[in-house]
Amino acid sequence: MQLSLYPALLALFESADSYCFLKDQERRYRFANAAVCRLFGLPREQVLGQGDERFFQLEHSTDLVTHDRRVLERGEEVHAAEQVTMLGGDRRVFRSLKLPWRDADGRIRGLLGLATDITEARRDTQALLRHNQMLSAVLDQVDACVYLKSHEGRYLYVNPKVAELYGRATDDILGRQDDELLPPDVAAALRRTDATVLSNGQRLARQETVSDRAGRERQFWSIKLPIPLPGMPPGVIGFSTDITELLALRGELEAERSIDALTGLASRPRFEAELALDLTLAERDAARVAVVVLDADQFKYVNNSLGQAVGDALLRELGARLRAGAGGSSTRLFGDEFAFSLPRYGSAEQLASTVEGLRHALAAPYHLGGHELRLTVSAGVAVFPEDGGSSTALISRAETAMHHAKAQGRNRQQFYAQQIGDAVSQRLALERDLRAAVAAMDFELHYQPKLRVDGGLAGFEALLRWRRPGHGPVSPALFIPLAEQTGLIDAIGTWVVQQACAQMAAWRDAGLGEVPVAVNMSTSQLRDPGLVAWLAGVRQAHGIADGQLEMEVTESMMMDDPEQAILSLEALRQQGIHLAIDDFGTGYSSMGYLKRIPVHTLKLDRVFVAQVDSDARDADICAGMIALAHQLGLDVVAEGVETDAQRAALAARGCDVFQGYLFARPLPVAEATRYLLACAPTARSGP
């Protein structure tokens, strides 16, 4: 067979780093550029005329053989990854483009190929997954199947749950596709779902069927989404939870469904079964469930004085109001005693408010048989898991609490665990005092120094402090979450930024230089479309230079809506705001988003710093995160540094800035000013 190529084209193929080759119908090489010859380690004359069996272990290079046949026999154009094993045993992966080579009559005479070696990129991806110890440690403990697949459906990562499901070692799963592990119909269904995720480029949640190692079909609720992979097309990451038992329990409930004949509410057995399902789900998700037992205080008098017919009508109306107002399942236990469940309720005070609202609804006048009836309701509340782990236990304890409420004078609610009731009272009192503090802005800022490796001052972090009248200092860990839940955080955040900028200006005007100050940003601030313009006005009013005001955000704040968070942070950065990720390492944020988040600084959480000098795993995690930050062009601040040994260990691993009690506690303004005066002028410049 004669081969004729234009000299310029031949020279181009010859000089290319990619592998360029031409094979005839018998799959013998008719052209091979210098890169192919280097790959095979042979001069060109020993390559031409040879078949692939001379260079590859074909029994372990099925992609290569299959793709060649598709081109030569069907005339297809193939663009795919090929995993091959060289004759010497080296396993490599190529990204290949193969086209049919036709003669003037359109007959296929051979194939033209162009391939790029992506072995190292594939290995880098797998190494990244293997060596991310923190992520692996978390995923290993997840009670769900977590996996990562390439765009071809080959497993790149599986957690122990996947290995347990398939009854195989992890290494025996990696590199395989579903059709090598599962029955054809099951594998085909999974493949279709993965293809939909990749083609749409969006998150997909649905129920899927998977066969376990014994061949039994298990039902999973799967969440899959596309994920970028270095050096290759996007893959699929999935999280699948086994819901087989839950579905079976739900089926039993449907089969045993029954109602209370008088009120139309669930019978007690059905209520207990549905409550058991709620408890199972709550235990899986670390959630809470409340059970409330209600009793009509004056029902016995109504029934005895007006007769059973009126009494039954009253019970029916009570049941109807309960069905309309209860958040979960509801039942008539017996007589005039009712119960309902509240799965996944919010805070303790929200629970108390819900119960109180329903008590008032049940106490509204009833017009029955020409009579206007008024009654009051006593309620008892029990909470899972604190007060019991079963339906029976929770109902029993809620009844106990209800009887205690009646004994205390009726027409009230009572929590079974007195400490819950006490906590509600304490929380309401704390909220009352916090609202008063916000109205008067009765707070102060303390400033904790941040020091560079050379001992120079990199700046301060402004930390909010509140002295509650009659109680003394309140931990920010207690009142900041309450402020966020009640919407008070917006006013507090505004005050903090204004105070910090005013103090920076005061230090500058006193001749202490430009002192960078960091403040913590709230989730609501990050979402505020007017934040950028408002900050510009505050900085202009106080003459704060670019890079001097730093805003700290947490990983969890950004993960609520990462795309919007990135846009907001980019706008702040463009305005000259220095940005930092606070408590890094505790939120498990996506590495894909991390490289896109426009921040300047990464702050290591104190949980990793505490034992960095004594725990090899913590030291390795810190070293890895510092290296990652530096690769992304970020500075690293270590929080919670309390000993010289911690500082030395962090410095040895490249940490840039330190913050903690080793250097100073958060200081009131006067003490922070004295600290500044004690610093050398050269030590007061920012990072």
Image: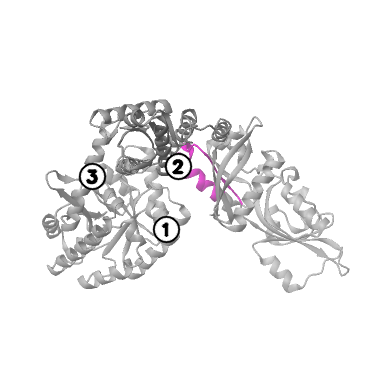
In screen coordinates, is 370 left or right of 499?
Answer: right
Of the residues shown, which amino acid type is indicated by label 2?
Answer: Gln
SS at circle 3: helix
Is residue 90 visible in this depiction of the protein? no
Mark 3 near mark 1, Cβ–Cβ under 8 Å? Answer: no
Spatial CA distance of label 2 from label 1 is 19 Å
Region rendered in magenta: 123-150
Compare residues 65 and 653 and report the one nearer the observer.
65
Which kind of residue does numbered mark 3 sit on? Leu
Q: What residue is at 64 percent from the left and 45 percent from the top?
A: 190
Residue that mark 1 sits on: 632
Which label's residue is closer to the chain start, 2 or 1?
2
Viewed as shown, does residue 103 lie left or right of 411?
right
Q: Secondary structure at mark 2?
A: helix
Q: Is residue 416 above or below residue 189?
A: above
Q: Residue at 16% x, 52% y: name it.
A: 667
Q: Nearer the viewer, mark 3 or mark 2?
A: 3
Most prominent secondary structure in the magenta stretch?
Answer: helix
Along the line of sight, which residue is nearer the eye, 144 or 394?
394
Quadrant where the image shows the C terminus: bottom left
Residue designated by label 3: 428
Of the numbered discs 3 and 2, the one sitting upstream in the chain is 2
* Residue 211, x across and y down, in percent: 64, 36
Task: Give amino acid for label 1.
Answer: Leu
Q: Residue 524: horizontal and vertical position, in percent? A: 33, 58
Where is mark 2, residue-wise? 133
Determine crowd level at label 3: few under 14, some 14-19, many 20+ residues with C-alpha closer than 10 A.
few
Q: Is 131 one of the magenta-colored residues? A: yes
Residue nearer the viewer, 653 or 587: 587
